[in-house]
Amino acid sequence: MKLFCLLWIPLFYLFWSSISSDEQLGSGGLWALLLGSIYAIAVFFFGPFIGEAGGFGYSRWLSISVDLVSVPALAPFLVFALFLPFRVCRDFTRFTLLWLIPDMLIRIIAWNVRNDPTQLILVPILRTAIVMGISGSIRLIMYGKVPGIITASLILLALPFGASCCYWFFFCQRPQEGFILLAITLIPMLLYCVFQLISTGRVQKSLA
């Protein structure tokens, strides 16, 4: 499980890099790793933002969302937006994936005692699903077509909420609901990867 937590996002990054467009990452890759490391170290030493509330209610869900699942996956998008005026990087998908790598490495150290599969397996998958789903939604919005904008807006609103609920269901020992939400949460990521593979295939045929 620790090996999975360590390798999932780096391997997914390599997979995505192999099928994505040739947008230049430039110095954005170094910035992503540097700022992602600073974020991870700050969380490790200064503790969680919300803390692990007792019970299984709203406070627990909020802790999951802010400290484990949604906010850590959304933070690199905010930083990327701040970099836009400086044109440091144009590939927000790879930027956000790289940002997540240092945090997952440090999380393994923090989670070493518990050895909990919901943390070591589910968290990296859900974070990747959020990053890819949001990246795909941004691409849809950039196309400027009304149906795509509506669909993307709904995904942007629902995906972080659904991912946090997915983890919460598993934490509450309700695996049936957890697996259902996990499958739904993964759909935008899978569609984005499939469309990218199709697009890459078309490009390769046109160059042949």
Image: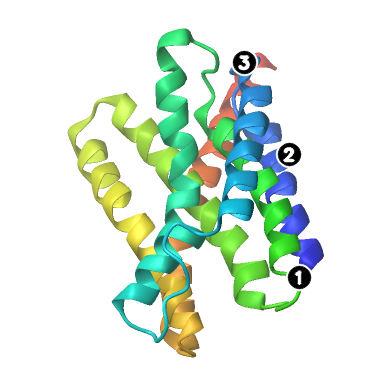
Q: Mark 2 points at which residue?
A: 14
Q: Is residue 153 left or right of residue 199?
A: left
Q: Residue 28 carries which label?
A: none
- Contact? badges 3 and 1 (CB < 8 Å): no
Examine the rendered structure and indicate whether residue 129 appears above or below residue 23: below
Which percent across, then down, holds residue 42? 59, 45
> Which is nearer the N-term, disc 3 or disc 2?
2
**Mark 1 element type:** loop
Q: Is residue 148 left or right of residue 194?
A: left
Instruction: Decide if residue 26 is in sight here.
Output: yes
Q: Which amino acid lies under the numbered mark 1 shown in the image of this protein?
A: Asn
Distance in Å between CA atoms under marks 2 and 1 = 26 Å
Which percent across, then down, holds residue 182? 47, 70
Q: Which mark is residue 112?
A: 1
Residue placed at 42% from the left, 76% from the top? 53
| Residue, far right | 3
> Which quadrant would residue 137 be assigned to in this image?
top left
Total labels drawn? 3
| Residue, far top | 86
Q: In this view, does 83 lie to the left or right of 31?
A: left
Q: Which amino acid lies under the numbered mark 3 shown in the image of this protein?
A: Gln
- How many other residues sit within 10 Å of disc 1, few (<14), some (14-19) or many (≥20)? few
> Which is nearer the N-term, disc 3 or disc 1?
3
- How many other residues sit within 10 Å of disc 3, few (<14), some (14-19) or many (≥20)? few
Question: Which quadrant of the figure contains the N terminus?
Answer: bottom right
Q: Which amino acid lies under the numbered mark 2 shown in the image of this protein?
A: Leu
Which is closer to the viewer, label 3 or label 1?
A: 1
Q: Name the residue under label 3.
A: 24
**Mark 2 element type:** helix
- Contact? badges 2 and 1 (CB < 8 Å): no
